Image: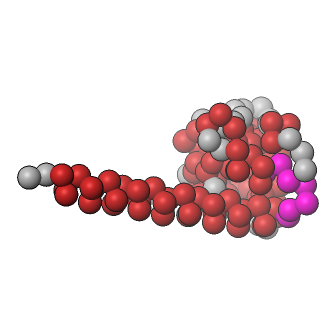
Amino acid sequence: MSDPMDIPRDIGGFIRDLRRNARISLRELADRAGVSNPYLSQIERGLRKPSAEVLGQIASALRVSTPLMYLRAGLLNEKDGQGVLAAIAADDDLTLGQKQSLTQIYETFRRENARAAQDAERAHDSEETP
């Protein structure tokens, strides 16, 4: 497996590969993501760097995780607590679909654990209240 920090930062190529793998036209992805067709084309060709908001819209339109998109764009790194996502994204033995599935499962577990921790904290706080 590659070092997660060696992940290529070519976000445009990554988006183009995801789009082609999903068999979605450039125009259709632009419509789904709420961006113009020329702007998306420029992103895919590496002429424009999309904002975090636009990356999130594209991730949603492609049904991939936003953190994975941010990671590939260089907006997240292992110091941000994204080591698992970096490892998944960097693993050359996994297909794109497998990477997407693992990322979604991981994010679901993290959300469930955060929610359970909040519930436990609320329960603890309410026990201490006289």
Q: Is residue 81 left or right of residue 90?
A: left
Image-based side of 98 in relation to 77, left or right = right
- Who is closer to the viewer here, 15 or 128? 128
Residue at x-position 77% and y-position 54%: 88
Give the image location of residue 122, x and y in percent: 27, 56
115 lies above or below 84: below
Chain part drawn in magenta: 89-95
Residue 70 occupies which quadrant of the picture?
Answer: top right
In which quarter of the view is residue 39 placed? top right
Question: Can the viewer see residue 117?
Answer: yes
Q: Which residue is rendered at x = 32% and y = 54% of the image? A: 121
User: Could you say which is closer to the camera, residue 43 or residue 83?
Assistant: 83
Magenta stretch: dominant secondary structure: loop
User: Please, is residue 28 above or below residue 71 in the view?
Assistant: below
All told, the count of numbered labels is 0
Q: Position of residue 128 (x, y in %)?
A: 18, 52
Res 61 quadrant in image: bottom right
User: Is 46 or 93 nearer to us in this picture?
Assistant: 93
Residue drawn at the location 33% of the way across and 60% of the way down? 119
